Image (cartoon, grey):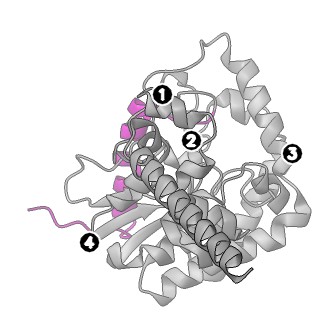
Amino acid sequence: MKNDVTKFVTKMVVLIAISVLVVGAVNHFYIRTRGYKGTDSVRLRFESCPRGLNVINLGTSHSECAFGYDGIDGIKGFNFALSSQDFYYDLEVLKHFKDRLAPGCVVILPVSYFSLGWGQEDIDRQNTDARYYCLLGYSSVRNKSLIDYIKQRFCPALFASRNLMLFTLGKGKQATADQNVALPGSRFSEAQLPGEAEKRARLHMKFMKGNNYANNLDNLSRVIEYCKTNELRPVLLTTPFTSFYNDCFPREALAEQWSLINRLCDEYDLQYFDYSHDPRFSPNPELFNDSDHLNIEGQEIFTRIVIDDLKERDILSVEVD
């Protein structure tokens, strides 16, 4: 009887050891495929972040597409925006990468039309929490799951499903550390753009819910206070949108947003740069990839305008060799 139990335990130990070795080998192979690296572009982008930054931006995809700092004299900048990134994660990202920022670094805090009104349920639908396990670590993730954390950090092959085989065969897209996600040209013709703008605006108006203002303003205030405590220079900003997109929003709804932003600026002695209706951009759809995201050409023009405006108001000082 005792020998049978010993044999059984021995077999189980051997089976577990073999399983661990097989899974480890598959995972070792998988994370070196083009496909896995294609899903890992956000981590690669953030890991490429240099030190000594004098201007950065946070925010959602609006600012992710709006800022590109390469080639601007005296500027060492980085784009920390991600699609559907709310003020909670803005703060967590800022804290995690604080050591990359120079003293007095300008921190651009973008506010889109929906930023003050969307709720946790809207953000949860985007399923974005998992990407922060690799970027920030377990403790910073809002809706923590130990299984998801293990999946993301230690064994992504176990959860790769059907994509594992496709990626293994080399059909995945190779990721790079290039931080610029803006696209060239426009995805829509000028005839298509009004309909696309209406669809986008209708979605974003669903996020503009007054019962979420207090929570979002509190989270934004925490980012501002962290900046001021750590000798950083926060500014608020709204990126440009096309006239087609802007025209879909009731003026009273936008006026309410502006009132809340201006009140925050008064409380914290902040500057607010509102480019949402800027005539250099809004009537020019050729500078946008869609109704509310700048393309590469628009990004280059916009970033230089913002840098010049920051200098003009003595918020950003630049030493050029």
Please check the rendered image and state whether residue 125 is part of the magenta-colored stretch, yes or no. no
- x and y percent of residue 38 in the render? 45, 40
Residue under the point 26% across and 59% down: 75
Please tell me the numbered disc located at residue 287. 1
Q: Which amino acid does label 4 sit on?
A: Gly
Q: What residue type is labelled 2?
A: Pro
In this picture, is 25 found above or below 51?
Answer: above
Please check the rendered image and state whether residue 310 is part of the magenta-colored stretch, yes or no. yes
Is disc 4 placed on a helix, strand or loop?
loop
Label 2 Cα neighbours within 10 Å, binned few <14 / some 14-19 / many ≥20: many
Give the position of the N terminus as an image quadrant: bottom right
Residue bearing the label numbered 2? 240
Give the position of the C terminus as an image quadrant: bottom left
Residue bearing the label numbered 3? 206
- x and y percent of residue 115 in the render? 71, 57
Q: Over which residues does the magenta segment extend?
A: 292-321
Can residue 309 be seen here? The reply is: no
Residue bearing the label numbered 4? 52
